[in-house]
Image (tube, rainbow, N blue to C red):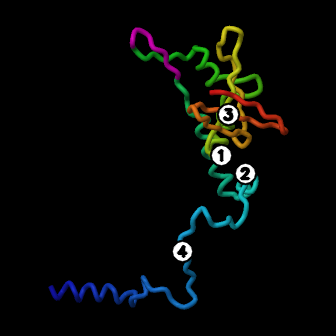
Amino acid sequence: MAWFGNAFSSFRSLWQGNATRIGVGDQYTNPTSYNDPPAAKVTEDTALQLSTVWACAKLLSENVATLPIIVYRIENGERVPDPEGRISVLLNRRPNSRQTSVEFRENMMLNLVLHGNAYARKERNGRGDVIALIPMAASQMEVRLLQDGTLVYAYTVDNHTAVLAA
């Protein structure tokens, strides 16, 4: 057993006991909490000025946007790919009149990466079918949970707020 004590003291002597000691002049802080004031205000614009944030957001949004989306339908109890279905066409070809599928998905993914969520408004025709998906800026959306458990979405543009129910 003596060999273990000698090996341990030899190993510890490599650092001279300094591995866990705080010396004079060393910076040592306690863990911070959410109650501490922020050092600087971080917004989407200030974050994207950092090349690392910009590169990560760009990498994620561009790569996820190019992944295939396969929509299925249930036929005789089996899942069957539905490449020509209305939702598949919206998601993979033309979600709205102003964007391609890749542009729409990049936009959605960028909102997700920078704000933690992404929103799109569904436009419907007279029969109630979804005919377009319009992206909505996550920074302009406020989600509220009502007393009865209902989610309500308040979307604000130019001091005008539209309240949307789920």
Tag shown at residue 64: none
The furthest residue to the left: 1
Q: Secondary structure at mark 1?
A: helix
Contact flag, marks 2 and 1 (Cβ < 8 Å): yes
* Quadrant (top left, top right, bottom left, bottom right) of the N terminus: bottom left
Residue at 25%, 85% (x, y): give it. 7
Residue 5, position as x, y percentages in the image: 22, 87
Residue 13 against residue 93 in the figure, above or below: below
Residue 104 against residue 12 in the figure, above or below: above
In front: label 1 or label 4: 4
* Quadrant (top left, top right, bottom left, bottom right) of the C terminus: top right
Query: What amino acid does circle 4 point to?
Result: Asn
**Is residue 58 at all visible to an observer of this figure?**
no
Q: CA distance from mark 3 to mark 2?
A: 21 Å
What is the magenta range?
A: 71-77
Q: Residues within 10 Å of mark 2 (few under 14, many from 20)?
A: few
Residue at 65%, 22% (x, y): give it. 93
Q: Specify which label sits upstream in the sequence, 1 or 4.
A: 4
Q: Specify which label sits upstream in the sequence, 4 or 3.
A: 4
Q: Secondary structure at mark 2?
A: helix
Tag shown at residue 153: 3
Residue annotated with mark 2:
44
Q: CA distance from mark 3 to mark 1?
A: 15 Å
Residue 15 against residue 57 in the figure, above or below: below
In front: label 4 or label 2: 4
Residue 36 against residue 150 in the figure, above or below: below
Residue annotated with mark 1:
115
Q: Secondary structure at mark 4?
A: loop
Q: CA distance from mark 1 to mark 4?
A: 28 Å
Query: What amino acid does circle 2 point to?
Result: Glu
